[in-house]
Image (spheres, rainbow, N blue to C red):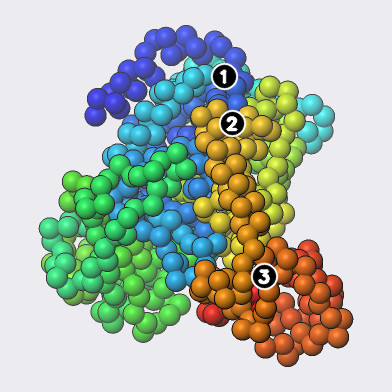
Amino acid sequence: SSLRNGLSRVSRAPAGYRAIHRRYDVIVVGGGHAGTEAAAAAARVGAETLLVTQKIDTIGALSCNPSLGGVGKGQLVREVDALDGLCGRAGDRAGIHFSVLNRSKGPAVWGPRAQLDRQRYRDFIQAELLATPRLEVMEGSVEELLVEEERPGRHRVTGIRLAGHAPPLEASSVILTTGTFLSGFLFLGQTSSPGGRIGDPPSSSGLSRTLKETLGLQVGRLRTGTPPRILKDSVDLTLATLHPPDQHPTPFSFLNTHTHCKPEEQLPCYLVRTTPGVDRVVMESLDDNSHIQEDTKGPRYCPSIESRVLRFPGRSHQVWLEPEGMTSNLLYPQGLSMTMPPDMQLRLLRQIPALHRVEISTPGYGVQYDYVCPTQLCPSLQVKTTQGLFLAGQINGTTGYEEAAAQGLWAGVNAARSALAAPLLALSRTESYIGVLIDDLVTRGVTEPYRMFTSRAEFRTLLRPDNADLRLTLKGFEEVGCVSAQRYNEAVRVKEGLEEAFSTLGSLSRSPRDWRKTLETSSISQNKGGTLTIEREEGMYLSPDLDYLSLPVSLSNEVREILDRVRPTTVSSDLVGSALFLHPISHNTKHSPFSLQ
């Protein structure tokens, strides 16, 4: 509370309004995950930055689920952290239930995840922004985006105008991170009202008008929703399946060796399932549910319970009961996003045995909002036809905190570089999930809210969550300019330590018997004699007559076809490596393609 009050005083003081007459390098509109990462990144690069948000108190708010990370999403959090972003450290501070998903599979697709304390997360983000040099925060509603036409069809951004007849704010770059607030409408039953989040107003219609009419951008419409929040005391948890956290929490940030929450203090989650009674209530409520009747596309991978029942009638669906905070009496029923009238929501919840006496704190609701078709952006996230205008987050058609944070950081980097007359940069999909995310958006566009999966990354075996620092931190310091010296020095130390270890391993020479003892999970031929190194085995000659299609080793059909077509000469051939990385073997196989056979 004292932190938020302090932030409010700083941002609303008269001195803050004297700053209106300044010219900024970068102005960021919106204080969600994209906006906070964008503002912090721009300031780290060296730009004088202003963050404008409608409500100071909601900076860093977790608008929907109180969690961070997951399969694919955890990789994004790790990469944002490797580039000195905020969300990873915030997750370590606010986490109350840590787990690594997909542990039964290979480490490349593991998904670090945490349930979060909403208040702790918001406090951490606000404190970090207050402590960031060259960054100011201001409360206000953006009425208009100011642009100049350089030639027909080409514009240049010059700043923003706030509501309330305030003088314009000038800037070389502007980043829009409006989330669900761009012409947002809330839906609950048959009622609808302007807004992007319950209790908050939508962004100004003037902003949408500038994008559509002045800049001529193609704008679409998407929808999302959120479940009701329920009182923990009204839930019979004895009828739910308990899911404890990992005994040894895995931090998101490469700078942290442990999480703020002690292992024994973590809170559990609970699993329940829907019943036929849930289906019945959904069908009875359809006539009173205008949101579900809309044609606007919603999230395929996080659908409402109404959409699930209509698409898969008669099926029992998982519902996770997740804690909202260390001392909160609220549970978040993940999997029960709904927009039916509140009385019907209560009826539906009580069809689940563990929730037969449940009480609702806040009903679920739906949101419809404008987004800009992202194929109109460059890989830097700058609008192709408007110099200095960058977009990040849900305005680009994505869904999720992690996707928003990743875009926000990269938009902040490039907005600052643009303002400082430095060349804009792009991340390759071969080196990061952030690169995959942005490349998918700007080259393919979206027809529904986009979310990240490991399956979207062709080089996912190389893009592990545990090596994001080695992939990005050095580049972030030496080329991008968004990484601190402290983080860079730590990444260099890790890199040098690994290189020394690899050199030592490469120099080892042992008998096959010793190797079999050391590498118990590898298949080393019993017929091998003499001494072996791993390095030497990579140079093994491959006969041009080798029958790859029937070779008795664990390779997928795709890999067999590639090897049969290309016919590499050695095991260490780049063609062999490319085939195995692009078409990895099944995680269920017992043998590695790199076994010493």
Query: In the rendered structure, which disc, 1 or 2, sits on the residue that comes first in sequence?
Result: 1
SS under mark 3: loop
Residue 528 in picture, x, y percent from top left: 67, 80
Name the residue located 29 percent from the left edge and 26 percent from the top edge.
3
Name the residue located 32 percent from the left edge and 59 percent from the top edge.
246
**Quadrant where the C terminus is found in the figure:** bottom right
Name the residue located 61 percent from the left edge and 84 percent from the top edge.
526
Other-residue count near label 1 (Cα within 10 Å), few / some / many at <14 / 14–19 / ≥20: many
Whether residue 346 is visible here, answered yes or no, is yes
Other-residue count near label 3 (Cα within 10 Å), few / some / many at <14 / 14–19 / ≥20: some
Give the vertical position of 348 relative to 591 (above or below). above
Whether residue 160 is visible here, answered yes or no, is no
Q: CA distance from mark 1 to mark 3?
A: 61 Å
Picture quarter containing residue 482? top right
Query: In the rendered structure, which disc, 2 or 3, sits on the residue that comes first in sequence?
Result: 2
Other-residue count near label 2 (Cα within 10 Å), few / some / many at <14 / 14–19 / ≥20: many
Q: To which residue does mark 3 refer?
A: 531
SS under mark 2: loop
Q: To which residue does mark 1 refer?
A: 48
Q: CA distance from mark 2 to mark 3?
A: 47 Å
**Quadrant where the N terminus is found in the figure:** top left
Residue 557 in picture, x, y percent from top left: 70, 83
Relative side of 494 to 33, left or right: right
Give the vertical position of 71 relative to 256 (above or below). below
Query: In the rendered structure, which disc, 1 or 3, sits on the residue that comes first in sequence?
Result: 1
Going by the numbered disc 2, the residue's amino acid type is Cys
Residue 482 got which mark?
Answer: 2
Going by the numbered disc 1, the residue's amino acid type is Glu
Residue 579 in picture, x, y percent from top left: 73, 70
- In the displayed image of the protein, which residue is found farthest to the front? 530
